[in-house]
Image (spheres, rainbow, N blue to C red):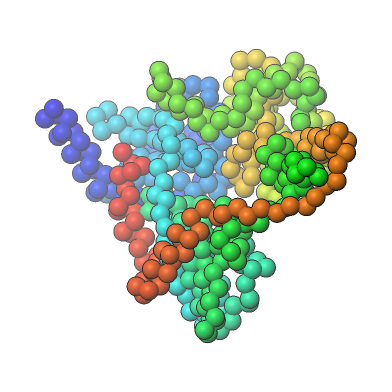
Amino acid sequence: MKRVIIVLLMISSLLWSAQVTRAKWKSGEKFSSYLQSKHISLSLLKTLDELEEQVVGEIQGGQTFYELKDDKGTLLQALIPISSTMQIKLSKDTKSDKYRFSIVPIKFKDEKYFANVDISKNPWSDISKNTHNDKLTPQIKKALRNNAAKLQKGDNISFLYTQKTLVGYLHGNPTIHVIKITKGAKEQFIYVDDDGIGHKEPFETISYMTDSTRNTIFSKSTQTSFVGNGKFSLPVRNPRVTSPFSYGRYHPVLRIYRPHFGIDFGVKRGTPIMSIDNGIVVHVGWLGGYGKAIKIQHSDGYMSIYGHLSGFRTTVGDVARKGDIIGYSGNTGTSTGPHLHLGIYQNNSPIDPTSVIGKEGSIVDALIDKVTDVIGGEKVAQTKKIPIYNAEKYRDMLESYIKNKTPSYDWIKYESQRADAQLDENFQ
């Protein structure tokens, strides 16, 4: 027991004497090149299994990652996010000086913050100047859209929001909960729902249709929950899913996380692979564990990856149309048999393809027509008020901050304090 305590104290001492730095992953940089730049033996790559090799290929150019270094600049640990919830962790063994590779959950700080801004010039520049959090502006604009009068000089805006941080740094977009706008003697509250949409009341009003006997036959939420947004089509005909999407499944025996950022379709070698949407072909060739692969950049920040192909029918720079044959399935790269790996990313973050594949509204619309035909009754428009989660609670919290004259949280002023406080949560 005494020896364990001494080791823990040594590790703690090393961590607190080290410094966290933030960097951007170089576009096109291979994981092996990064290891060499840190004087880490490439023998580490031999310890990776097939899925871990694929995960290494998921690191995106421009991705923010974090390094813990000692006072001599030697890398002690590195945290490289590969999704919104999981990260690669490189850690140096204090005894052997060898590095270990693992995939672990990201440990965020998820806390509430307050801002109170007097408009002296421009509301957006004033908010940025007072908070030094530029991610607030687009979220506030979204919440205020069509819900508040134009902010002018002399007005005041205060708001309560939740912001994630990782090792003391901002991570992801803030979540606005409630906003108060003061124009002279007039006050207005804006309550923000889970989608970031603002409402003048602490509830959301939804519309739906019923028949003459008041049986619900259609609602917006029903359509969304059944078919997603349906932006993309399937890459193969009559697909058979052999491995679903997962951010990270914990293996109880191996005690490691095994993410799978895409869907695997079981198909025969040589099966035609189709583009899931219109886009520009940005990669054709070998792509790490994906073997022969194609990348297509679509609109709205989406990108699709088609892996383990046997051949190509397109080149970089081509315009791919939805349904165009772009290549043929195979068994290249890290693969145990012929299949297609389809990955879909939005703004460089992997998303579950099943949430965006399908023809929007087709299932529900067909169901509505069928039910309407059977009932044959008159459709009647109905509305329902759905309370916004914790709306009154957040409003009271906001009022308390204002009453106590709490200053706006300044993200630059307290950056070093946050980093020190959170150092031991991810770097362990």
Direction from residue 62 to residue 292 in the image, left or right? right
Q: Position of residue 171 (x, y in %)?
A: 47, 52
| Quadrant in which residue 355 is drawn | top right
User: Which residue: 55% across, 55% down?
Assistant: 388
Position of residue 116 in the picture relative to residue 208 (left or right): left
Residue 22 shows in the view: no
Q: Is residue 299 above or below residue 178?
A: above
Q: Which quarter of the rendering shows the C terminus? A: top left
Task: Give the side of residue 229 with respect to residue 30, left or right.
Answer: right
- Closest to the observer, 218 or 349: 218
Q: Quadrant of residue 213?
A: top right
**In this orientation, which residue lies closer to the viewer: 95 or 267?**
267
Image: 375 above or below 64: above
Query: In percent of the image, x 45 and y 72: which residue is there?
Result: 116
Specify the quadrant of the image occupied by residue 3: top left
Q: Residue furthest front?
A: 213
Residue displayed at 72% across by 47% down: 220
Q: Position of residue 64 (x, y in %)?
A: 49, 48
Callout count: 0
Relative vertical location of residue 63 with respect to residue 162 in this rendering, above or below: above
Q: Which is nearer the eye, 414 or 290?
A: 414
From the top left corner, tell me how far across and down residue 333 is, in percent. 62, 22
* Residue at left offset 80%, top offset 43%: 211
